[in-house]
Amino acid sequence: MTIPNFFKLLLITIFALAASAMSALAVSAVAKSAVNVRSGPGVNYAKIDILLAGQSVNVTQCQGNWCYVEKDGPDGWVSGKYLTAPTGSGSNADDAAAKAFIEMFGSIVGGIIQSGTPPPATPKVCFYNGINYTGSKFCVNAGTNNNKLVGYWNNKISSLKVDSGASVTICRNYYYGGACLSYNNNMPALPAIINNQTSSFQTF
């Protein structure tokens, strides 16, 4: 009996996961329907993109029922229930194995990660309406963008806290227009050119 290539890949992957909590294996998949791409593995994380039905991705890791996908445009996390094996990519047995692997991948990796060292937290960027990180604040996960600040926070940002591994670009105008400044470290007081004059931002 010939073992389908995908089953061979599955066996190799399980052994690799047992040796390491974090795996870099990529598995091809397609979206079964439109689904939000988020900055972290859960609905509480910010939406950064939309995966369209039939769009191809590479799954590189999963946590629970959420999988990190690489694709054209921003990479991020999607619910694994919206992913399936690509059609026409090999034998029916291989496709069935791929589908089963994607559905169980989150549980395997999630269990190993929970029993070992937890994955690092997603870095955040925090915005304050006072200098030296005082007054009101709001925080977002790296990868969150806002092209039009409205209401209270438009033209109200005076200082920033930027976690290690994150960066932020703030702009005077909507849609990232006008003067823009970028930071990858804390800023206790923004310069006059943009202090209390931020109307849009991007985080990375």
Image (cartoon, helix red, strand yellow):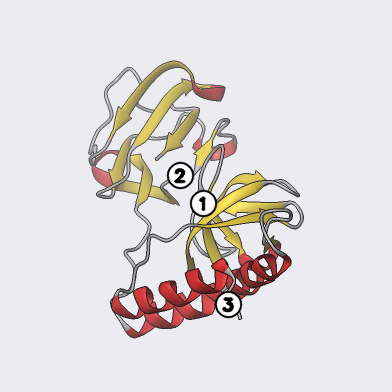
> Considering the image in quadrants, where does the N terminus appear?
bottom right
Residue 159 occupies quadrant = top left
- Disc 1 versus disc 2: nearer the observer: 1
Q: Is the residue 103 above or below the residue 27 in the image? A: below
What amino acid type is highlighted by mark number 2?
Answer: Gly
> Considering the image in quadrants, where does the C terminus appear?
top left
* Residue that appears at 47% across and 57% down: 26
CA neighbours of label 3 inside 10 A, class few (<14), some (14 to 19), many (20+): some
* Residue that appears at 59% across and 69% down: 102
C-alpha span from label 1 to label 3? 19 Å
Q: Nearer the viewer, residue 140 or 31?
A: 31
**Residue holding disc 1:** 76
**Residue holding disc 2:** 143
Locate residue 107 relative to residue 32 in the image: left or right.
left
C-alpha span from label 1 to label 2? 9 Å
What amino acid type is highlighted by mark number 1?
Answer: Gly
Locate residue 20 relative to residue 112 in the image: left or right.
left
State whether residue 76 appears in this view: yes
- Residue at the extreme front: 1
**Residue holding disc 3:** 104
Q: Earlier in the sequence, mark 1 or mark 3?
A: 1
- Provide the secondary structure element on which disc 1 rests: strand
